[in-house]
Amino acid sequence: MITETAPPRSHGAGGPGQRRRPSHPRRPTGRLLLFALPALLVYGAFFLVPTVQAIQYAVTDWDGISEDYHVVGLANFTNLLTNDDLFTGALVNNLKFLLVVVVLQTGLSLLYAMFLTRNSRSSILLRALFFFPTILSSVSVGFLWSFVYNSPDGLLNQVLGWFGLPGYAWLGDARWTIVFVGLAQVWFHTGQMIVVYVAGLQQIPRELYEAAAVDGATRWPRFRYVTWPMIAPATTIVIAYTTIQSFKAFDLIGALTSFDDFKTQILSTQIYLTAFQNGRFGYAAAESVLFVLLIAAITVAQRRLVRATEVR
């Protein structure tokens, strides 16, 4: 009986005895880069070009309308830093606003998040309730708090009246007005920061707390040496976001108070008034450049401060 044997199969490049070549990720081709082109065009048109133009106009006296303007060099920056009480006042107000918002919003969001870390029904419901103001527009929040602060018939004054206490002009005292505006900002965005902290707290291994409990650590040492270092990345996000929002509270202040009210002016509203009310676009561009540099410097300083406590 004759049996036919199948011819031996030839092994390819990946067969036995032969080493496969390591596969390298393909570099993006021209066709793939075309997908990013629309986003790059939008980014360039609405960010890069205005940024370059702002730097260009910052050294001129352009009024925003005329085709002709004169180059004044660093005169705008010199006047801003040495002889502009409006800009200095707006800067001081913005720093007060920043201090109130960053301290209260960061502290409250972390405190609430520590009580709402578990994914129980009550915790999820409370997170949703705290997050609800975030989905509102800044203008609606400003109008809402204007009814709360309104004098003499606002909500707060009505509550004071129930206890026989006199009303108070909440937005009338120049020393405290920016603080009360900051409280509205805290109510507006605390729920959003709670979500960030809850996510950070849920990533901490439970074994660390168990080991700390075995060593006899009480609540404060556990928070100081376990919780706080482990949530440093979340704190960096919260503080950076809160800082940027504090400098961008333009529409909240516009709805809550008048743009012409000096005691509530911050840098963003001052830039708006300089450009569109006074027609000094070149000077407003110089204010914008200093504005961006200030935000960058504060954000970098905060990031370094928080990262010093981060677990590596």
Image (cartoon, helix red, strand yellow):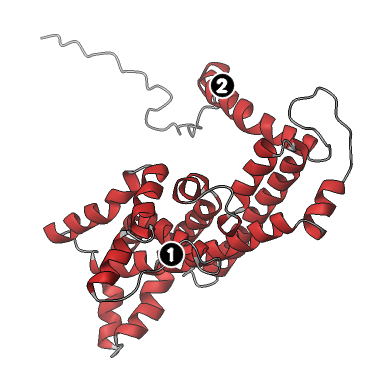
> Label for residue 303?
none
- Along the viewing direction, whichever of 47 and 133 lies nearer the viewer: 133
- The residue under label 1 is 170
> Label for residue 37?
2
- Say if 222 sits above or below 52 in the image: below
Tell me the residue at 70%/55% (across/down): 86
Tell me the residue at 32%/64% (across/down): 156
Question: Mark 2 or mark 1, which has the lower sequence index?
Answer: 2
- Along the viewing direction, whichever of 2 and 117 lies nearer the viewer: 117
Report the quarter where the N terminus lies. top left
Left or right of 267, for residue 133? left
Mark 2 belongs to which amino acid?
Answer: Leu
Mark 1 belongs to which amino acid?
Answer: Trp
Closer mark to the observer between disc 2 and disc 1: 1
Q: Residue 121 occupies which quadrant of the picture?
A: bottom left
- Say if 4 sits above or below 97 in the image: above
Report whether residue 193 is seen. Answer: no
Label 1 SS: loop
